[in-house]
Amino acid sequence: MENKTSYKEALNNRIFEITMHAAAQLNVDSYVIGGFVRDFLLQRDFKKDIDIVAVGSGIDLAQKVSASLPHKPKVQVFKTYGTAMLRFDDIDIEFVGARKESYNKDSRNPLVETGTLEDDQNRRDFTINALALSLSENNFGELVDPFNGIEDLKNKIIRTPLNPDITYSDDPLRMMRAIRFATQLGFTIEEESLKAIERNKERIKIITGERIVDELNKILATPVPSVGFKLLHQTGLLHIILPELTDLQGVEEVEGQTHKDNFFHTLEVVDNISENTEDVWLRWAALLHDIGKAPTKKFSKKVGWTFHGHEFVGGKMVKKLFERLHMPLNHKMKFVSKMVMLSSRPIVLAQDIVTDSAVRRLVFDAGEDVESLMTLCEADITTKNPNKFKKYHNNFKIVRQKIVEVEERDHVRNFQPPITGEEIMEIFNIKPGREIGILKEAIKEAILEGEIHNDYQAAYDFMMERAKKMGLTIGNLQ
């Protein structure tokens, strides 16, 4: 049943009045629909985009609106989809003709034909996204709500307008969107709809990695991402999308010795880090920081469960995971991989006596990302023992202070040995060879160990002593 309540206050942007007049001149009805209406009713800040549906040609309406605007913004036309877009006051406005859709089982791209407003609302993913406000002169601002989406908003429910099995099978990305909206809005997915996601989970395989990652990024960007990942896990989607994570689930016991459930530990770490950073790639690092534990898990009668080298293995797994999901293989992937590989280093420091040498090596290896690494490692403290929790955090404060002191004194962050390979070749009159690498590595190690200061003269004197032992003299190779 339609709700005829007026929400004119939502339409105080002049673009809506201009659209109303443009639609009247074309003799078509038009409506603002979807996220803008939903977020207005939820009193959320709306994103800078608005969807307008015309019962007629959306392209014609977009061009008419553009002609009525002061600067006549360029209209981008997508004829294949019958849509057009223009930008006004930093807002992207998309115009589409009302349509009905049908699908084949191998694609989420629908076969489209002209339809009514009712047809258009029927094709929407969720009742809360099917809400429309009229932009017609005779009933401007009236809400059209055929699926009682208002009640679902009030009750915080995610529900499909039609049969959820059909909705999710037609476009399997909607399963990810249901979970993402539940996570973003703090809503509950209606029970039958949730069961339908589990029934249709295999359909997610026809969705591209890019689309899936876009939804994962939005889940990761929420204040409590674990809500979404638990739903992905519950419905079986996560095992298909990120098996590296679900492989961490479960606790094994051998001879009375167990290990923690690394899957649920990981979700705690992601929630922890989300309190301290909005960097989605650092959140990815938190999500993947333990993925190397599944392939490295072993039981030893002497020490119990071990995960030797899991950081190195996990760092290598990051690249393969990014490739599989068509994620960026640039500096973002390298950052996540680096964070995973180094994820245990500060923890070891926080548990032992903090030496200058260990801190220098940490700062050298982490470089400009040392602060991100420390944030990740502090988020990794999930112990429920209050004494251990306090002790670890206090130790991390000591590590942080040591980093500041060592960096101010030794300047090892991203440092290069003060003497270059070219200088070594010139000083000893030698050609490129292993001796150069040996000397450069020796200088670097001496600086990191604190044997010499990080300056040219100290490095030169050290190099001359080491070269002498190697049989090298100035100008000659002995």
Image: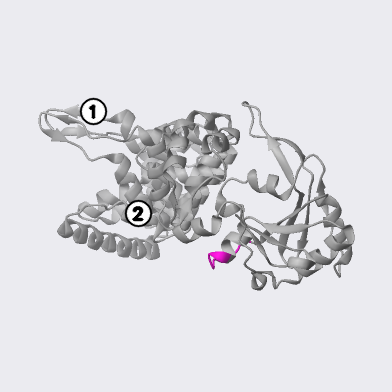
Question: Which badge, 1 or 2, comes first in the chain's sequence?
Answer: 1
List the single residue furthest toward the front: 1
Q: Is residue 217 left or right of residue 305?
A: right
Q: Amino acid at mark 2?
A: Arg
As for residue 232 lying within the magenta part, the answer is: no
Q: In this figure, which residue is indicated by the disc labeled 2?
A: 360
User: Residue 366 placed where, x, y %?
Assistant: 42, 50
Q: Is residue 239 left or right of residue 33?
A: left
Q: Amino acid at mark 1?
A: Lys
Q: Which residue is depicted at the point 32% across and 40% down?
A: 263
Image height check: is 324 above or below 263? Answer: above
Q: Which residue is depicted at the point 71% across and 62% down?
A: 134
Q: Quadrant of residue 396?
A: bottom left
Badge 1: how crowded within 10 Å, few (<14), some, or many (20+)? few
User: Residue 313 placed where, x, y %?
Assistant: 37, 33
Look at the image and tell me in which quarter the C terminus lies. top left
Q: Determine which of the numbered discs, if any, sits on residue 298 in the image.
A: 1
